[in-house]
Amino acid sequence: MDSGLYNSLIDNNLLIEHTECDISITETLNCFKVIKPVNVPLISYPYEWCFSQLKDAALCTLRVQKKALKFNMSLKDCSAYNIQFFNGKPIFIDTLSFERYQEGKPWIAYKQFCQHFLAPLSLMAYKDVRLNQLLKIYIDGLPLDLTSELLPPMTKIKPSMLFHIHSHAKVQQKYSRAISLNDTKQVSRHGFAGLIDNLESSINKLACKRTVSEWGDYYQDTNYSETAFEHKKDLVSIFISKVAPQNVWDLGANIGIFSRIASDMGIPTISFDIDHNSVEANYVNSINLNEKNLLPLLVDINNPSPGIGWQNTERTSLLERGPTDLAIALALIHHLAISNNLPLEKIARFFASICKSLIIEFVPKEDSQVKRLLATRKDIFPDYGKSEFEKCFSLYFNKIEANSITDSHRSIYLFERNK
Amino acid sequence: MQQFNSAASLLFIFLLIVLFPNISYAYLDPGTGSYFLQIVAAGFFACLFAVKLYWKKIKTFFRKPQKR
C-alpha cells in the first residue's frame, strides 16, 4: 500500500478496490488485518470464458506484474482464478498476491502463468477451441507436457511456443532438484522484465482458431419475419421492465441481442451460450462498445459447470451461484425438451431453481425449427404442446402474462415463481 | 563410545539432509525446471527487451547518415 502500487493499480482499473475493516469483526485467531474487497456480482471461472476473455485475463495479469515491478514488487502467483470480470472487463482480485521483488531471483509464478494461461490459449489457437474445457479437470492449469503433446508439430518452430511450452515441459521432467533456491543473482531485473515482455508478446500474437458452427450465423437462419422479430423484442422489453430485476441470466443467448435489452437498461446481465463462436462474438462486441453490464459466458445448460476442487466446493457449481432475479429463455425450450429429451415438468423445475421470474418462449411442434429437429428422429414426444407446457410450469410458477408473437407460431410467457 | 556417538550423529544429519527436501518458504511450488529455464534464458530475454526498448533510437541512429 505504502509503495504506491495499490493506488497505481486502482487508477488503471487493474485491481479490485478494498476497504480495511475493524480487526474485531474476525472471531478467529491472530491476523494482521481484515480487508473487504468490493463485491463482484457474479463469479465466473476460466473454463467458462471464451478465447478472448482468457487472453484479456492473461494480459491483465501481465500488466499487473509489470506495474508491480516498477514499484519493486512482484506477483507470487499467477492463477487464472485471480482474475474476475467486473464492469465488463477483467480485473485482478488477489490483493494478497504481491511480495517484495528480490533482484536476482527467478519468477516463482512463471510455471503457473504458463499452465493457467499460455497453455490453454495456445491449444485454443493451434488445435481446437474446445480444449479450454480441460481447465475444468486440471484446476491448477494444464500440465505443460500434455499441452506439448497436444500441440501440432509446427508450433515447435514458433520461438515463443518452443520456449515457454515445449522446452518448459521437457525441463520439468529433467531438472527436479538441481537448483538451490537460496542462490541469488541468477535472473537480473532486465532478464525478468524481458521474460514478462516476451510472454506479453506471445499472448498478444495468439488468435482464436475459428471453427464453423451451426450457431455462428444463427440470426441469418431463423424463421422470424422482420415483424415477428421486432414484436418479440418489444415483448421482452416490456416484460423486463415489468419485473425490474436486479440481475438477469439470459440462457441460450447466442450473440446477446436480447441480453442487450436488459443490459442497456443498466441491469447486470449474464449471456450464457454453449457455442464458443457466439460467446466470442458477444464478448468482442461488448468490449468494442465498452459495455459495463454484460458478461458473456460459455456454458452448456444441459451440463452446467460443476463444483470442482477440494470437497467439490473450491470453485462453486454454476447453479449454486444463483438464483437470479430474472431468467430469459428464448428459442430454447425445444432444444431442452426435444434435443435433450427432457420432460417439460423437469424443465419447469429446473427454471424454478435458478430464478425468481422467468421470460420464456414456447416453441410448438408446428414451428419449422421443431419440425427440423424431428425430421431425423422418431417423435416420442406426444405430450409436447402448449397445454402441457402451461400445466407443468403452473406447478412452480404463476403466469403473469402471455402473448403470441405476430407472424409466428411461438408465444412468450412471463412467469413469477410460486412462493 | 564418544566416536560411536559422533559417527551416529553425523549419520543422522546426513540422512536428514538427504531424505528431507530443502525447506522452502515459497507460496507455491515453482518447479525447479522452470527456475532453470529462466536462468538459462535471462540474458537472452534481457537483450531482446533492451533492443525492443531502444529500437527507435537505433533506427534513427542508422537513418541519419543516409539523410545527409
Image (cartoon, coloured by chain):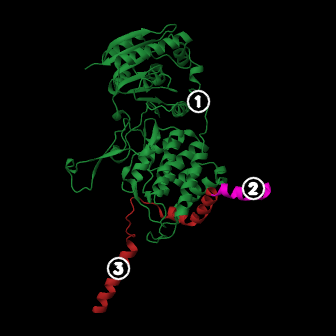
Chain colours: A green, B red
Q: Nearer the viewer, residue A33 or A145?
A: A33
> What's the chain of the residue with tag 2?
B
> SS at mark 1?
loop
SS of the residue at dot 3?
A: helix
- Judging depth in this view, the residue of A381 and A351 nearest the camera is A351
Disc 2 and disc 3 in contact, CB within 8 angstroms = no
Q: Please tell me which residue is depicted at 33% across the width and 45% down the height of the picture.
A: A18
Between marks 2 and 1, how big is the CA–CA gap?
A: 50 Å
> Along the horizontal axis of the image, is A272 left or right of A392?
right
Q: Which amino acid type corresponds to the residue marked 3 in the rendered image?
A: Ile
Judged by its main secondary structure, the magenta piece is helix
- Mark 2 vs mark 1: give the one in front: 2
The residue where tag 1 is placed is A213
Inspect the image, locate mark 2, and give the three-letter code of the amino acid beneath it: Arg
Residue reaching furthest front? B68
What residue lies at 51% left-to-right and 53% top-to-bottom?
Answer: A114
Q: Is residue A382 visible?
A: no
Q: Is residue A118 left or right of residue A139?
A: right
Image coordinates of residue A380 in percent, x first then y, are 46, 17
Point out the stretch of residues depicted in magenta: B54-68
Query: Is residue B29 or residue A43 the one in the foreground?
Result: A43
Task: Give the residue pinned by disc 3.
Answer: B13
Q: Is residue A170 left or right of residue A47?
A: right
Which residue is denoted by mark 2 in the rendering? B63
- Residue under the point 59% across and 62% down: B46
Whether callout 1 and callout 3 share a subunit is answered no
Mark 3 closeness class: few <14, some 14–19, many ≥20 residues within 10 Å: few
First reached walking from the N terminus: tag 2 or tag 3? 3
Residue A359 painted magenta: no
